[in-house]
Image (cartoon, helix red, strand yellow):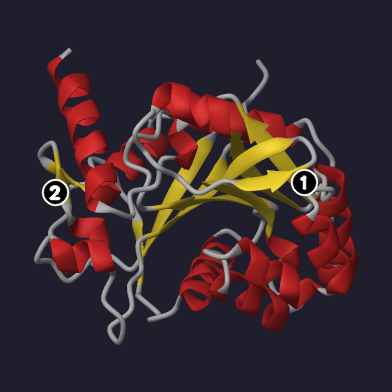
């Protein structure tokens, strides 16, 4: 009987004590991942989607501790908050490598995609498995996103193949996680502004970006040159992995969706 490979999953639920999340502040809360949605904290919905996938093994939650009282419905590994996005990613990676030294890849998910479906998680992992690469980044084309979430008002990056927003699932070869950390940290700091990221990568990238000649293949080639790792863009036919909740209107969209899902 053939066994199915499972992968550790890292859920990024960290927060900054110096710069409160705007949505959390608008909701009168200190931490975004704990905002209640249809009877559960936001992060619990993401963990539920992961734990129901046959391709996910142990789940590591960064930024949540037992004293937060979140019922995940399964055993998780709690990883202490590190007060910065990049450091929280590395804390999750280090925890996986300490507990599962034999692990080759890990799935990374943001805690703010509570509409995530288990089927999407399984599809993403199996799609990445079928490709050659070291890290895989999900994106969603504008028409796909707006068909499912017409009022989401996501930001889209225009490239040669169309207009895309970033997704919040990643599949990473753990051995390359410590490569070129300074550049990765800077790119993550500018992740809300594609133009600022393009400036970091040089004049040629800026020109191609501004004239919409930058392609998915260009992005993959740049990742290999700059990060010494094979990056792959995974275009998702599923919008839920890109429906991150950053603004009050997005929270209301997801609340209505998950309340309806529970009632059905």
Residue 246 at what x, y percent from top left? 33, 55
Label 1: element kind: strand
Distance (Cα) linking label 2 and label 1: 34 Å
**CB within 8 Å, label 2 to label 1:** no
Which residue is drawn at the image coordinates 80% and 44% (left, top)? 216
Is residue 238 in sight in this rendering?
Answer: no
* Residue located 18% across and 12% down the image: 264
Vertical position of residue 125 compared to residue 245: above or below: above
Q: Is residue 138 left or right of residue 37?
A: right
Q: What residue appears at the point 12 percent right and 60 percent down from the top-left corner?
A: 27
Image quarter of residue 152: top left
The spot of residue 104 in percent (x, y) is 70, 53
Labels in figure, total: 2
Residue 253 place in picture, x, y as percent:
25, 35
Front-most of 26 and 178?
A: 26
Write the residue at 28% across / 83% down: 17
Q: Can residue 79 be seen in this view?
A: yes
Q: Height in image: 238 above or below 160?
A: above
Q: Mark 1 = which residue?
A: 232
Task: From the image, tell me which residue sits under label 2.
Answer: 36
Instruction: Say what secondary structure mark 2 lies in.
Output: strand
Q: How would you rate the neighbour count of disc 1 (Cα within 10 Å): few for under 14, some for 14-19, many for 20 or more?
A: many
Q: Give the x, y percent position of residue 26.
A: 16, 63
Viewer-proximal residue, 186 or 150?
150
Q: Quadrant of residue 132?
A: top right
């Amino acid at each position: 009987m053939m066994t199915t490979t499972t992968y550790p999953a890292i859920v990024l639920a960290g927060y900054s004590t110096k710069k409160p999340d705007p949505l959390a502040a608008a909701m009168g809360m200190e931490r975004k991942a704990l905002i209640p949605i249809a009877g559960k904290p936001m992060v619990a919905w993401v963990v539920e989607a992961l734990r129901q996938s046959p391709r996910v093994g142990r789940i590591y939650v960064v930024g949540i501790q037992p004293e937060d009282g979140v019922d995940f419905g399964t055993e998780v590994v709690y990883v202490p908050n590190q007060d910065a996005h990049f450091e929280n990613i590395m804390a999750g990676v280090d925890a996986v490598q300490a507990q599962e030294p034999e692990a080759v890849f890990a799935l990374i998910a943001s805690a703010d995609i509570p509409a995530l479906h288990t089927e999407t998680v399984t599809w993403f992992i199996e799609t990445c498995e079928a490709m050659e690469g070291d890290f895989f980044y999900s994106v969603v084309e504008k028409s796909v996103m707006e068909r499912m979430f017409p009022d989401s008002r996501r930001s889209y990056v225009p490239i040669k193949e169309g207009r895309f927003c970033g997704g919040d699932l990643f599949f990473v070869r753990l051995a390359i996680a410590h490569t070129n950390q300074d550049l990765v940290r800077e790119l993550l700091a500018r992740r809300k502004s594609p133009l600022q990221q393009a400036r970091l990568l040089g004049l040629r990238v800026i020109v191609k970006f501004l004239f919409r000649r930058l392609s998915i293949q260009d992005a993959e080639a740049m990742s290999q040159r700059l990060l010494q790792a094979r990056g792959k863009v995974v275009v998702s036919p599923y919008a839920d992995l890109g429906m991150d909740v950053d603004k009050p209107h997005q929270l209301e969209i997801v609340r209505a969706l998950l309340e309806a899902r529970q009632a059905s």
